[in-house]
Amino acid sequence: MAKRIAKRALNAILLSLGVATIAFVVIHVLPGDPATALISPRLSSSTIEQLRTQYGLDRPLHVQYGLWLWSLLHGDFGFSFSQQRDVLNILAAALPYTIILALTAILIELFLGSLLALLAVRTQNGFIDKIVTVGALVTYTLPTFWIAILLISIFSYWIGLLPPAQVHSVGAERLSSIPYAIDFLGHLILPALAIGLPGAAGIARFLRANLLKVYQLEYVLAAYSMGMSELRIFFSYALPNALLPVVTILGLELGALIGGALVVETVFAWPGMGRLTVIAIFARDYPLVLACTIVSGLGVIGGNLLADIAASVLDPRLRKEM
Amino acid sequence: MSLPEKSEHHHGKQRSLRRKLMSGVVLALLSVILYLQLDIIAPAFTSLILTPLSLAAEPGLFARLHVLRVIEYWIAALVWTLGVAIALRGLFAKRAKQAPQRVGATQRLLSTARERYRRLGLGLQVILLFAFVAAAAPFLASWDPTAQGSLPATRLLPPLTRAAYVEYTPVAATPTAGPISKRLADANNYLLNRLIRFSALEDDTILAAPSPEAMQVVRRGDRLFFLGTDHLGRDLASRIIYGTRVSLGIALVAAVGAVIAGAVFGFAAGNCGRIVERLLMRSLDVLLAIPSLFLILAVVTFLGSSIPMMIAVLIALGWMAPARIIRTEVASLREREDILTAKLLGVPTRRIVLAHMVPNILPVVLTSLLLQFSTMVLAEATLSFLGLGVQPPIPSWGSIIGEATGYLHIAWWIALFPGVAISTLIVGAHVALEGWQRGPGS
């Protein structure tokens, strides 16, 4: 078990190094120096040279790479050109927002998805089942940005219930702690739904198929023939076994969301990693873009690792497999 | 044995009835649109039919015909004819001969296979429908998708609003004397140079044509904005119809490109030595760990965006998943007995790959193709939504929604309808995919 995890972790570290390298190469091979974005044509060429030296852009590429990797290993992500702040500080400000959003979305996915799957399985081939299956297929395939826009149109402009963007209302900082938290939650719901709804639909479909498969298995049949109650069979045999692969999916998804939901965060002006990435790319801010990529790459790899570990903790069969 | 026979017969009858009904509906729709859009469809057919005739009479004419610009109308006319022909055939064709009755397991297998192909067919029909819309766009769209009309008259009109208009064409400088080529020139002139002006709804004043002496009034009237207009007064329905070309075209080319690239990589990795294979697959892992949307964003922002660039970027990021699936398939094929036997018999590798592996891989290729297609539709829409894809004024479904974000509180329709189009197309691709993946016997 420990050996397996250690092997996986080593693999993950190598992968992260690969991601960092590729991100560096992609950003630097593409034309358009950050200097071109940063420096206005009014500056004299000597000033430009001075700026290039200051940011280390005049050195050969492999030297830049070496220096960058070295400071990266020391936890130094560099200095953002466009925001004139340490990249680490910017990341530290954005990450909590993304993590809250990601966790809320994952919770929505898990609960809503399981609930729908249960409903569908209990009414198998019935009317509700058909609605759930078809509805889940449609929701699952909808573009995220469109879901976000529909949510805003319906809940913000039509019903007027929830705010369409931002994290806090104007003047929220003067509120006391409980109204402040409620205000924040109100802002959290729509973006979390925009991410969570398609995910929940995917999980509902997947879990439904899994549950139906598990109900065909011999141990469930054995439990039935022993006269076990329907509920007990469901909660102690069918559901845990059907949920196992879902845990893997959720782990992967959580990892992917750490990089930020680019589209949803942009639509809702949510100050997390996704929006930061978009802003950094538009500003051609090399260090910031690189840091964002690495964080999301690490998220994906970490999510993989997490899913792996969770699966082997939950499923004894996987532990033996090594 | 009488029961299944009867139901089989019954099903066949029902199917052919349904087919006739569908054909009738399609034919009726085509005729209604023909009636509504006769002023565009008639000159288009005139142009299509008269061009070869007048070229035969007057070969020097070719250079003056603006062939490249009229060609979209010719394609629309051809596709239209094809659609009518298919509908007529479905309506009047005799029922196909009943297949010989099969019993038991064979019949069950057949009915699962039928169900599988029914879903595949349903999904493909949806995709084909959009392809038809893309090809016949000039006939289906009422207005030029980029024409802004006059802002006070047509800005942000809700669906099903009417607006008065005047339609002008240039006074044609007839380049030829012959009656055939004169009619041809008139038709082309109408198709390429017509101009529409709207009046404000309250009063009847209609903006004049830019140069009254060169333009003549063809007709006045009022027309329906079926899905409303956007913030620049452009007809939303026309933009969505023309947007189909961009969205579908980019997605199709990118999906085919990605699957071909992936297949080449998959075959290469599956047919070379262990170490090279592991190396290739590891690098694939690294590439897959990079968030693709980030990479697309980075490349497009730094390199600028045009349609060919978008296709290239989408292919560059989409080939990994097909590569992985096809590699797995090749690796499992390699161990199969027929392939091993062929190897032992000394069949050259090239022949093994082409004659024994490629046909076996086609089902997986179709799966990847459908999957990539829906992914590409989504990716294109997302990019264009963020303003990094198709650039204005060219309409694409994503960019229409992107432009609508500032007007959500006053104009719900702009973002709604293109989204419906995107979802329908993607759901169609997924239904086809599911039908295909289900497979007979499972």
Image (cartoon, rainbow, N blue to C red):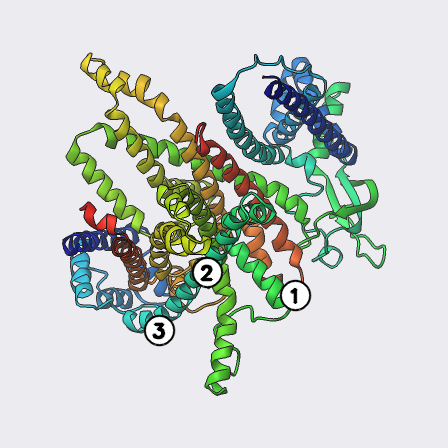
Q: Name the residue under label 1.
A: A158
Displayed quadrant of residue A283: bottom left
Q: How crowded is mark 2: few (under 14 residues within 10 Å), some or many (20 or more)?
A: some
Mark 2 / mark 3, whichever is N-terminal: 3
Residue type at numbered disc 3: Ala
Residue toward you, B122 or A223: A223
Residue toward you, A88 or B117: B117
Q: Which of marks 2 and 1 is in front?
A: 2
Numbered label tally: 3
Residue in the image at 58% along x and 58% along y? A150
Residue B208 to residue B341: above or below: below
Q: Is residue A226 left or right of residue B98?
A: left
How much space separates mark 2 and mark 1, taking CA atoms?
A: 27 Å
Residue in the image at 26% along x and 48% along y? B286
Q: Mark 3 points at which residue?
A: A93
Of all chains, the one bearing label 1 is A
Displayed quadrant of residue B371: top left
Q: Mark 2 points at which residue?
A: A111
Q: Is residue A117 left or right of residue B137?
A: left
Mark 1 / mark 3, whichever is N-terminal: 3
Callout 2 and callout 3 share a chain: yes
